[in-house]
Amino acid sequence: MAGQQDGAVPHGAPGGSRPTWAEELLDHLRPGGRDVGRVCAWLAQAADAEVSLADDTGTLLAGTPIPLDEDLVADLTTGRVAAAAWAERGRHLRLVGVALPPPAGSGVLAVARPRPFDRSTAEMVTHTAGVVDVLLRARETTAAGLRLERAAADLRLAILQLLMVEDTVSARRVAAGLWPGLLDTDTACVYVAESRPDDRDRLAEECLDATGERALVVRCPAMAQHVIVLTPGEAEADALRGLVDRRPHTYLGGSARQCLVQTATAYGQAVSALAVARFRPDKAAVYAERSHPERLMDPAALRAWTARVLRPLDTLPHHTRAELLATTRLGLEFTAVSTAKILGVSRNTVRARMDRVEGLLRTDFSDLTVRAAVQLALNTEVALTAVPDDDGAADCPALGDLLATPAVRAWAAELLCRLERDARDLRRTLRGWIAVGGNAERAAQLLGVHPQTVRDHVRSAEPVLERQLLTSGTDLYEIVLAHLALGDLEQPVLPGREPGVEPGNTD
């Protein structure tokens, strides 16, 4: 009869329409109900009592504050007693020690009510303390798992950033401890998978599952919809293509196989291929191997010219020089903001490094012809590291000499002549737009048209040339070099050039 009067037993009446209090309590262990605050609120209602959960310093974690004897709390939190019960001034209390995740370590679940605790309600308090303990441990395990996942993601990003600045030794050292064998390769491909930003985390997890630990999967720090995957093998690439094929609103761009030291180049190729993938039925594309102008130049002459252009940086300490050049290579390919996110530095740091290179080279990066020439030199330094310096080459060629060869001029003519099929004279617009640094307003003043006309013409030239022009990068710089090869633009001012040494070529 005492149990009936207490009010707890009706919840557990055998055969009743409502579940027992034990079943209700177990419901809080289901995936959708794991909340310590809700458990304390349930106990307060079921036992018609005040409930508090506090740590060993008295800080309230859930429920409502209940004044407690400090010595008794100390006995519970230190483990000298497991539970306690007493009555004072018309108030009945039960206290149970609860293990808390670090840094607290221990706490007290306290229940206070005006009526004495019968056996059923006392058991309810004890079992609730056990559920609270399980939930807290589960929450700590989940939090630890999330911390581990974040740490692994941060390490993968750090490895990618080291590869982006050509520090393959450090990248391999970091990867070896966690993902043995991942970078035991000289070459690799970079893929960029794109989804909606709110679906990016799930895409990254699926990329990890599809490739296992045989690929480096990184959430792109610059683009919220991109996942970057560096993979040494073809099997992982096939897995990525299969993944994209099954997922809606997902696209994949891949690079050509590159040396690890050229990871930044491979990344740029993957981004370029991604633009093509958006229009493909299979939603995937690999960077097309086409005739790049540097492949049509004499390697020894190109190397000698590159050495002359970059010679002002040779007095810098090796690590400083490498850092400046790696940052500039990315900065010429992407915006300062994107470059900063990729490298994990501030955009002011990116701009400061590029300004320093600009000053050392005594040139102007606002000039697209300068940017194209410097990017050519930077990429050549990486690609031709195996080509020995020719000490016998006393006469260093000028850029105009490199571009004046029949092979390069034929390549440039074939490329730019595609624009002549359009009656709007896209070639004239593009030439004027490049000459003023890619600024549509200034180009419009130069050409006597509306700025929107300039933008429309440049945008129309992109599919004809099969290159992205409205964003700086390799595609645009190749078009600039084609104009320089045909004498449509003045040769850029570069280090070591004397007036009249590097004249523009004319038809």
Image (spheres, rainbow, N blue to C red):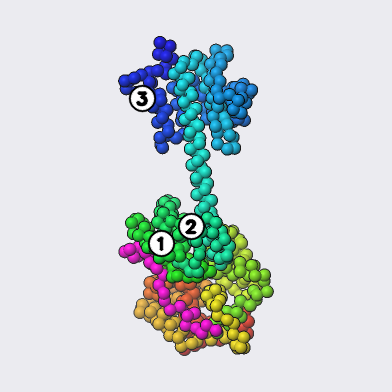
Give the x, y percent position of residue 427. Answer: 42, 78
Give the x, y percent position of residue 59. Answer: 59, 30
Query: Residues under labels 3 and 1: Cα distance?
Result: 51 Å
Q: Amino acid at mark 2?
A: Val
Query: Residues under labels 3 and 2: Cα distance?
Result: 48 Å
Q: Secondary structure at mark 1?
A: helix
Tell whether 207 sits left or right of 66.
Answer: left
Q: Residues within 10 Å of mark 3 (few under 14, many from 20)?
A: some
Q: Secondary structure at mark 3?
A: loop
Q: Which mark is residue 218?
A: 2
Q: Secondary structure at mark 2?
A: strand
**Up-down relation of residue 341 to residue 422 (above or below):** above
Q: Which mark is residue 19?
A: 3
Which of the marked residues, 3 or 1, is nearer the chain's N terminus?
3
Closer to the eye: label 2 or 1: 1
Q: Which mark is residue 236?
A: 1
Q: Residues within 10 Å of mark 1 (few under 14, many from 20)?
A: many
Which of the marked residues, 2 or 1, is nearer the chain's N terminus?
2
- When asked about the image quadrant of residue 388, the answer is bottom right
Q: Residue furthest top?
A: 1
